[in-house]
Amino acid sequence: MKLKALIFDVDGTLAETEEAHRAAFNTIFAQAGLGWKWSMDDYHELLKISGGKERMRAFQESLPQDERLGDAEIAALHKEKTAIYGEILARGELELRPGVDALIKAGRKAGLRIAVATTTNTPNVEALTQCCWRRPASQVFDVVAAGDQVSAKKPAPDVFNLALERLELAPDVCVAFEDSLNGVRSARGANLPVVVTPSIYTDRQDFSAAQLVRPTLEGLSLSALAVL
Ligand code: XBP
Ligand code: MG
């Protein structure tokens, strides 16, 4: 295949962001006096639900009806969570996963387009590029397709299809990079070959539908991707 674009998932693939997300969620729960606190074990289960607002809604299903928040309250809390997540990333402590920057640089050098297809929202993508590249997302990626721009989040294929639409490319000249089963299902649903690098919260998931599973992107060549 004549490879023309690399399409990256964000959370768990570009960087191990989910501990920052979990800290931001727990901070807003405490500030709101909800008495909710998500442990790593809780979050391991909750991350099977794609999307922060959807995750909060799924979590409160286990609570008595009169303790559940309405959609407007969840949306307001999630907006605050996004602001806190941005503050956490602004500390500049988060690093890209091994091999990510080298692969993006090699892709750029070979004239490939670089895109993002993520469940998280555009402010969080911006926070990550500022933290890890010290640049706006528009200077790191040619295309950003984010969860707040599609009606159905992963595992639906919508966000990868949006990335392909904006790239004006067919899936057979692109490769997707993911860390989760939801992400693999989304990429495969868009007919994209997908490379998986399991992350701290997804390492026990089933990646049999992926074309390649590697611990990290280190040492992955464009020629190896072109034959997927
Ligand atoms: C992972 C997700 C997101 C993040 C939290 O997205 O499912 O929901 O956990 O971000 P990705 P939000 O597709 O990049 O792996 O709170 O903004 O949803
Ligand atoms: Mg992910």
Image (cartoon, rainbow, N blue to C red):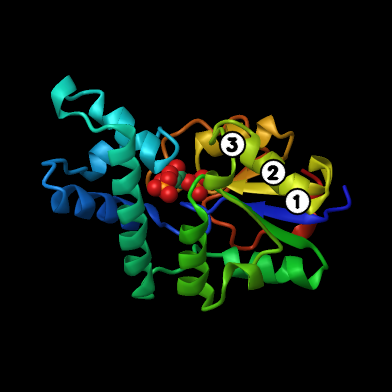
Q: Amino acid at mark 1?
A: Arg
Which residue in the structure is indicated by mark 3?
184
Q: Most extreme residue toward the top, as rendered?
A: 65
The residues tagged by marks 2 and 3 sit, at their Cα atoms, a distance apart of 16 Å
Which is more N-terminal, label 3 or label 1? 1
Above or below residue 80? Residue 203 is: above
Q: Quadrant of residue 57?
A: top left
Q: Quadrant of residue 62?
A: top left
The answer to whether residue 19 is visible is no
Q: Is residue 38 left or right of residue 127?
A: left
Q: Nearer the viewer, mark 1 or mark 3?
A: 1
Q: Is mark 3 within 8 Å of ligand 2?
A: no
Q: Is residue 210 left or right of residue 34?
A: right
Q: Where does residue 155 sit, x and y in percent of width and height?
A: 55, 32
143 and 47: which is toward the camera: 143
Q: Is residue 213 left or right of residue 109?
A: left
